[in-house]
Image: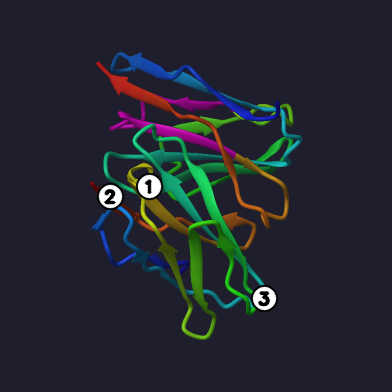
Amino acid sequence: DGGITQSPKYLFRKEGQNVTLSCEQNLNHDAMYWYRQDPGQGLRLIYYSQIVNDFQKGDIAEGYSVSREKKESFPLTVTSAQKNPTAFYLCASSMSPVNYGYTFGSGTRLTVV
Amino acid sequence: AQTVTQSQPEMSVQEAETVTLSCTYDTSENNYYLFWYKQPPSRQMILVIRQEAYKQQNATENRFSVNFQKAAKSFSLKISDSQLGDTAMYFCAPKYGNKLVFGAGTILRVKS
């Protein structure tokens, strides 16, 4: 079955460490996105990529980095520069243009300890 | 600026009754798409319904329907015969350019 997979489901990070969240899709979608969701809040766009080897900053890119070396993969690195990284992270993918909406992964809960 | 307003942070409805969630947006595009997503306690985002702006007919998916008022830039979601499984956070998401912009969400609680 086609889908989008995020791993791990839960992740703990010590302060000062970088950590990478995985997002893989086998839907043959061109575009991929990373969102951050804080408790009881909406989704805020971190980074997105419309095509391999290209990506754009979203609304809250500071302290995060991404790469898009393969169509199927769009990993997100939360760096030590991100001052408040504890949150729920959602990855999504879509055809381009986005006329049929996004398909979302099941999310990664990141906690700084 | 791309704005999406969901003016009801929280709502409650009795099982089997009907509830309407509101959404307004701002766009200068003429042909676009709008979506409602549902996020239950599992936190999995699920597409509920999709509307094409050039179609005058309101979209319907089983118990879910929309009231799309293009001139007013309003896109409300109606849930009929509410069920306990409808308890979730609901997000309105119009397409701006080539990505979706999400509203702040409405928490819907269905009571037995």
Contact flag, marks 2 and 1 (Cβ < 8 Å): yes
> What's the mark number on residue B56?
none
Mark 1 or 3, nearer chain start: 3
Same chain shared by disc 3 and disc 2: yes
Image position of B1 with respect to A112: above or below? below
Please indicate, yes or no, whether residue A103 appears anywhere in the rendered image: yes
x then y, percent, for residue A18: 42, 18
* Chain name for mark 3: B
Query: Which of the two residues, A83 or B40, is positioned nearer the viewer here?
Result: B40
> Which of the image's four quarters has the C terminus of chain A?
top left
- Which residues make up the magenta segment? A75-92
Element type at marker 1?
A: helix
The residue sitting at the right extreme is: A28
Quick check: do tags 2 and 1 share a chain?
A: yes
**Tag 2: Cα neighbours inside 10 Å, few (<14), some, or many (≥20)?**
some
Q: Give the x, y percent position of residue A32.
A: 63, 39
Mark 2 or mark 1: name the one nearer the start of the chain: 1
Q: Earlier in the sequence, mark 3 or mark 2?
A: 3
**Secondary-structure class at tag 2:** strand
The mark found on residue B55 in the picture is: 3
Inspect the image, locate mark 1, and give the three-letter code of the amino acid beneath it: Asp
Q: CA distance from mark 3 to mark 2?
A: 31 Å
| Amino acid found under the numbered disc labelled 3 | Lys
**Residue where numbered disc 1 is placed:** B86
Relative image position of residue B87 (x, y in whole percent):
33, 45
Badge 3 crowding class, 10 Å Cα cut-off, few under 14, some 14 to 19, many 20 or more, is few
Give whichever of B46, A14 is nearer the camera.
B46
Give the residue at mark 2. Answer: B110
Q: Is residue B34 visible?
A: no
> Does residue A78 show up magenta in the picture?
yes
Q: Quadrant of the N terminus of chain A?
A: top right
Q: Is residue A105 left or right of residue A68?
A: left
